[in-house]
Image (spheres, rainbow, N blue to C red):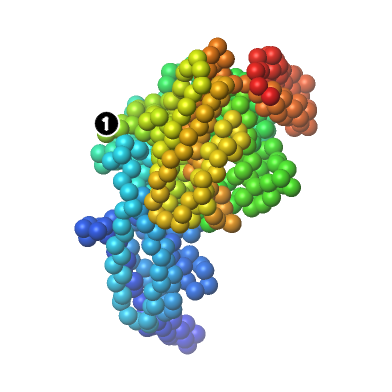
Amino acid sequence: MRESLCLTLAILACLSSEALFASTLQIKVVDVESRQLPCRVHFKDASGVSIRAEGLPFWHDHFVCAGFAELRLRPGRYDYEIERGPEYERLTGSVEIVAGKRKKLVIALKRITNMSEKGWWSGELHVHRRVDEMPLHLRAEDLHVAPVITWWNEHDWWRERSVPENTLMKVDQNRYYDVMAGEDEREGGALLYYGLKKPLPLPGGRQAFPEYPSPVKFIAMARQQKGVWIDIEKPFWWDTPVWLASGQINSMGLANNHMCRSSMLENEAWGKARDEKRWPPPRGNGYWTQEIYYHVLNSGFRLPPSAGSASGVLANPVGYNRAYVHVGADFSYDRWWEGLKAGRSFVTNGPLLLCRANQFLPGHVFQTDGTQEIELAIEVISKDRIPAVEIIVNGRKKQSIPLELSEQSKLRTQLTFQKSGWFLVRAIVENPGTFRFASTAPYYVEIGKEKTRISRRSVQFFLDWLEERSARVPSKLDDEEKLGEVLQYHDKAKLFWRQLMQQANAT
């Protein structure tokens, strides 16, 4: 009885101490017209520990809210960052919490630009968050398209649920998320699928089924349905040359999940590793990603770049890596994908990069029998310092135009093409800790009879890669029959790349 009384008194003492020293902070975020504004909040104590808000979605170092959050805090100083995608300013500050006091913090978040009014609509293709959270994520990140990965090798959300006839969900008037996106991620790398009516019957994960069946088998299975979109999630995955040779790929992840908001996943995971002497960490992976994509374009492929954050797996908010697609005023989910297919787009995890070449949007194909003169009009909107805007021609930096430290810059330059090729515009932020950038999709130039530039160097790059990749497969697959079935796709890919080398018309 005495021990029970002592325990009760101890509990009451703790409760009264908590009541005495804990405080409540109410955070209200509004727009310039004082309307409550959905947003993302990074809130940390003095030791750098991220604080959760009860009842609100939390991931890694942030929570999202509809513009209001209530936190129960101990006394002390707290730092915060508040964002709503790249079209709003980033607000930072600190607040001092006093024991037993209630405090209100009202923050007005200003819009920097309105991309949808200019015809540009944002989306991202790699989301691993809960389906019921998605409406709030779309609003808080000012995002318009976000398919949700509900099935992959490790987990199929639909095993315990019936598949609805319509998997596309609409939020407000112009935000969409599809609940039928999927991912096949094994030893060869990761492919992302969109537009399917039901999940593919994928084998288990990389540990259980690293090589068999070949991912190409599921590519063929998916293509039995119309309207399916297949994305190479990152360029450096080992099976990239095999997947490209299949002719069934729609896009490639240039702004991918190795690029995180406050850090960089510095290696290539189990993909093809870069030469770290050429591209040292932490940002070398970003340059390697771009170099491979340029080899793809130099091999004659016309794949638009895509973007994905893998929020829910890696340390990113939803929409950190995103693609902006020009649709115009008449926006719809289907029209967004049509614009992405046409390459009327740019990818970013920070700056906004608008470009017109002779008044045309990215993805345009210039056709002429003589010299092609091109005037570029470029607009950059950024919250971070960008030293220069770079013009990439056929995989090499053709121009580097210094950029003054300002929130918004406009510039013009010219290009001259006398042979077929391609070009794009990119801007890389001055951030030593992560690869923060923007890149337009490519423009293409066709001069005379040679419609497409095919580089012998780039084709050889993938042939060498494919030989190295094929030699790795037997170490993970000792069943001779299964090994032969997988390697047949590699053999077909080698034939494809050898035939492509015969068509090469550039060094």
Q: Position of residue 373 (x, y in %)?
A: 47, 27
Q: Quadrant of the C terminus?
A: top right
Secondary structure of residue under mark 1: loop
Total labels: the figure holds 1
Q: Nearer the viewer, residue 482 or 423?
A: 423
Please say if 5 is above or below 286: below
Question: Residue 345: image x %, image y %?
Answer: 43, 34
Furthest residue toward top: 449
Q: What residue is pinned by disc 1?
A: 330
Q: Residue at x 59, y 30 (%)?
A: 394
Neighbour tally class for label 1: few under 14, some 14-19, many 20 plus, Cα within 10 Å: few
Q: Which one is in front, 414 or 455?
A: 414
> Does 89 sit left or right of 370 as displayed?
left
Q: Is residue 480 left or right of residue 15?
A: right
Q: Going 46% across and 67% down the picture, which residue do you hit?
A: 44
409 lies above or below 72: above
Question: Which quadrant of the structure image shows residue 329?
Answer: top left
Disc 1 marks a residue whose amino acid type is Asp
Q: Residue at x 44, y 81 (%)?
A: 14
Q: Position of residue 433 (x, y in %)?
A: 58, 56
Would you identify the image quadrant in which residue 254 lies?
top right
Q: Which residue lies at the image location 46% right of the left edge and 38% below the top edge?
A: 413
Tell me: residue 468, above or below residue 437. above
Does 238 appear above or below 245? Answer: below
